[in-house]
Image (tube, rainbow, N blue to C red):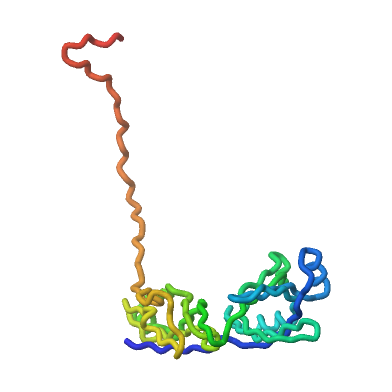
Amino acid sequence: MRNSEVTSMAQQAKLTVQKRAEVGRNAIKKVRKQGLIPGVIYGVGQEPINLEVNGRQLSTVLAHASSENILLELEIVDGDDKRNSLAMIQEVQHHPIQRQILHVDFHAVSATEKITAEVPIETVGEPVGVKTGGGLLEHILRDLEVECLPGDLPERIQVDVSGLNLNQSIHVKDLQLPAGVEAVTDGDLTVVAVSEARVEEEPTDTLAAPVAPEVISAKKPEEGAAPAES
């Protein structure tokens, strides 16, 4: 059985950030009062750089993203100096109640070195086993771990399940990934499956027979032993 997968590349955007010289709680409070968001960029082979990010620009980037995989071309401004860095958003911390962004972590990557990331899996279509066979679609694997160059990273993987009949499934090894993208997840794991609907047995109304109380009698004395005192 063949299935078709439609993939789209991870969103790429540009973002200008400022290098932040001051560190510590007071410095972070000062940054936030200015409407900026404290952040940091780090990666293999480079020292972490403290940043301050325009909150509106970052919110716009996040609002237009349909997945967590966002590839950014960061322009890091340090006084009169500017440098560009390719990075991915590693973590965004929000206020637990007010939900505004408190901190952002960027992970610097190289355009020529492969990365490992998790890509969400979405299903497309209604299985024939559900439509005509009364079955149930089970979406078992929600994310797929892949390895590829940053520019080849898929934003999502959409799996066409319309051809699935009863008791049929799609495994990781069945997925048709775009060129340059390899699955790290075990190929034998099930992504989606169509199973037969389970019919629950209705409880019976018959009453169980009452259980007679257990009668505890005195222990019979062993042969040749004196009878117990009353």
| In this rendering, position of residue 53 left or right of residue 119 | right
| In this rendering, position of residue 127 left or right of residue 23 | left
Most extreme residue toward the left, as rendered? 223
Residue 54 visible here:
no
| In this rendering, position of residue 180 left or right of residue 171 | right
Q: In percent of the image, x 52 and y 80: which residue is there?
A: 115
Q: Nearer the viewer, residue 11 or 49?
A: 49
Q: In percent of the image, x 30 and y 34: which residue is there?
A: 212
Q: In percent of the image, x 33 and y 73: which residue is there?
A: 196
Classify residue 225 by image quadrant.
top left
Q: Percent position (x, y) of residue 7? A: 49, 88
Classify residue 25 by image quadrant.
bottom right
Q: Percent position (x, y) of residue 223? A: 16, 15
Q: Nearer the viewer, residue 211 or 119?
A: 119
The C terminus lies in which quarter of the figure?
top left
| In this rendering, position of residue 155 left or right of residue 17 | left
Q: Nearer the viewer, residue 145 or 1?
A: 145
Q: Nearer the viewer, residue 47 or 101?
A: 47
Q: Percent position (x, y) of residue 21? A: 78, 73
The N terminus lies in which quarter of the figure?
bottom left
Q: How many marks?
A: 0
Residue 209 visible here:
yes
Q: In percent of the image, x 62 and y 79: which residue is there?
A: 108
Q: Percent position (x, y) of residue 174? A: 36, 83
Please determine whether, in this image, residue 204 is positioned above or below residue 27.
above
